[in-house]
Image (tube, coloured by chain):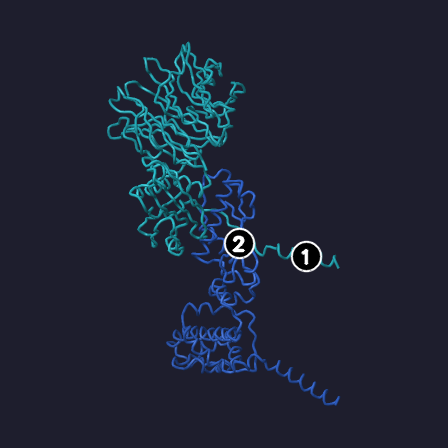
Amino acid sequence: MKKIWFCVVLCLMAFSSKAALRIDVVGAQSNPMPIAVADFVGESVSPGVREVIVSNLERSGLFRVIDKDAYIQKMEGVQSVPNWADWQTINAQALLYGTVERTDDGRYKISFRLWDVFEGQPLLAKSLSLPAQEWRRLGHMVSDMVYSRLTSEDEYFDTRVVYISESGNPLRRQKRLAIMDQDGSGHHYLTDGKVMVLTPRFSPNMQKIAYMSYKGGKPRVYLLDLKTGKEEWLGTFSGMTFAPRFSPDSSKLIFSMAQNGNTEIYEQNLRTKELKRLTNHPAIDTTPSYSPDGKKIVFSSDRSGSQQLYVMDTDGKDVKRISFGSKGAYATPVWSPRGDYIAFTKIQDGAFFIGVMRPDGSGERLLVMDAYMVESPTWSPNGRVLMYSKQMLNEEEGSVGKSGLYSIDVTGYNEQHIPTPNDATDPAWSPLLHSKK
Amino acid sequence: MWHSSFFYSILLHTAIILALFISIPSWKHPDEKPQSVPILIDLKNIKIAEKTHLPVKGEKVESSKPVQKTTSALAPKKVEKIVPVEKETPRPESKALLDKMPAVKNKPKPVAKPVVPPSVKPQAKPKKSDEEDMEQLLASVEKMGKNLKSTSVSASAKNKTEGQDKGIKGGVSSDEGETLTISQIDFISTTVRKYWNRDLGIEGAENMKIDLRIFLDSTGHVRNVEFSDQARYHSDAGYRSMAESARRAVYMSDRLESPFVVVPEKLRREDIVFTFIP
């Protein structure tokens, strides 16, 4: 009897697990996702918060925010219930809406919901609060959460960019350290412009900025404390120091030092001030950058006759060349925070390019190539977007035109201009300002 | 007692055999022919006439009914026989079409040949094709009439036919709603693909395959979508993004174009596995 039952159950299982039909769908589109962002109701800053969100999502290149004049249903705050047919009609794939309130302690609190319109399922429901003067950051944080939920990428909108602001006579440029949000808002200067500064870099813990300054007539690496505003000299070195970059744990600084006509890479422990020489070669070794796990360093060197990219261990051993461009020279390598790519500047036949390659040198792709000069790539904290400086040629006058900051998706699409008050070069992208989740 | 039972049994069996010969279903609709006439007039359209030139699959001729006689007279072979007759003896345009049909059976008379004036010939050709068209139409209308006999035609089956045999007569005669044709599978795949919009920057996306299990309701709309690889969905962010974009494509295509209504009713009770390959 048991055997019979066993057979019956087996038959039933076999029957129930049978897939009636298999259909393959091959090849997808890659267009921006249409999304509806309804008005945020509440405080006077509500429209501004919505604008920040809309701007961020559209600038990412992955979303197309549907014009709000097309919305059929008017959402009356975070408690509203969407009428799916109204949103499906305008082909919105996701719907975002919410409320901004002022709390008793003077902060702004934003509550929002994100829905999958065609499935009718909630994707996100959150509340955030920040001091009133940081209301734009609320917009960035909401953008981050929406972006991350819909794309599964890490967040990057709530970040800042430090760069060199250039102004004045071309022969006597004033170069100042400036900082702003990644979308160009909240701009202010960190130095007064009396001394030329170059190559600023954020520390991963967001406490310091390292940069090269010509203070005292001698180019040296300095550290600026972002909380106190105090400027600190890295140390007394006999040679010129430049091209600084922090280790992933912010405990060390790696940089180039030129002594007696030879440029080598050094690493300094910021707590103990211990200095360690990592390269030892008559060629120029410079622009070092750590891998995100802190175990490798990529740098550029002309030891092969032309400037190429090399990877070595953090103790300076096991140096391997990774770029093999037959004609071009490679410079300013930066390891992606995701670890999957190394971005670089390539110079070939008098033209400049921004490109990426795998850490082993494979898969080289040039992303930006239509300018007089492009250089200094920097990664967004999620490793998805590159920012760089770009200078155009003024064709009418035959002179060099303005330089500005641009960003581009790692896929090579969606180049965006970042507005700055003056000419801008040498950007460095900060880590995420808020802690994730 | 035993004799009478035997007699009744014989009588009953004879009645059944007779009924089978005469065709029971035709008793239900004795007035079928008058119903089909107005439809014939409505279908007097060039495009439809072209389609009706195609041979009708599996059409059987039964001689017991007048309507079926007409069908046999309109069979393609007999139409071919008519051709020389029509060329040689053009008929007046005003004659009713149905009146011509008995004449089809008449053997062509060689005497008619010299009688035909040369100027009439060009008129006869289009007339002939018209007549053929009308005859084909009659055949197709009769076929429609036969289909009308079946009272168990469901709405879904109608939809399937509409989407499937775009004007090709007999195209569905072999499909009893048990499975999907290649064209239907291709239609569903193409429709869903239109709405599949994925992010190009997902690492390793080119090597990902997303399997979704889709459950339909009785009306052919999506009731539920399940990810086959739940473990990877929860552990791999890139896979999750791809899988969600695929799920959105299924829901969007269903809401906006309803491609799954072509799925036969029987298959709607079972799940469909979609494999999304970027």
Label 2 resides on the chain identified as B
Confirm whether residue A267 shows in the render.
Answer: no
Q: Quick check: A431 left or right of B23?
A: left
For residue B37, above or below residue A73: below
In front: B16, or A81? A81
Label at residue A113:
none
Chain in blue, by letter, is B
Which chain does the numbered disc 1 sit on? A
Classify the position of the N terminus of chain A by image quarter.
bottom right
Q: Name the residue under label 1.
A: A9
Q: Label 2, label 1: how many angstroms apart (C-alpha)? A: 24 Å
Which sits in the foreground, A135 or A148? A135
For the residues labelled 2 and 1, say whether their Cβ atoms are less than 8 Å apart.
no
Q: What element carries label 2?
A: strand
Q: What residue type is labelled 1?
A: Val
Could one spot residue A79 in this view of the protein?
yes
Locate residue B165 relative to residue A160 in the image: left or right.
Answer: right
- The hue of chain A in the figure is cyan
- Horizontal side of B249 relative to A425 (left or right) equals right
Say what amino acid the circle numbered 2 marks: Ile
Determine whether A223 is above or below A158 in the image: above
Task: Please tell me whether mark 1 sits on a helix, a strand or a loop.
Answer: helix
The x, y position of residue B142, in whole percent, is 50, 76
Q: How many labels does the image show?
A: 2
Q: In the rendering, which numbered label is found on residue B214? A: 2
- Image location (x, y in percent) of residue B268: 54, 60
Q: Nearer the viewer, mark 2 or mark 1?
A: 1
Q: Position of residue A285 (x, y in %)?
A: 45, 18
Seen from the viewer's position, the closer of residues A288 and A365 is A288
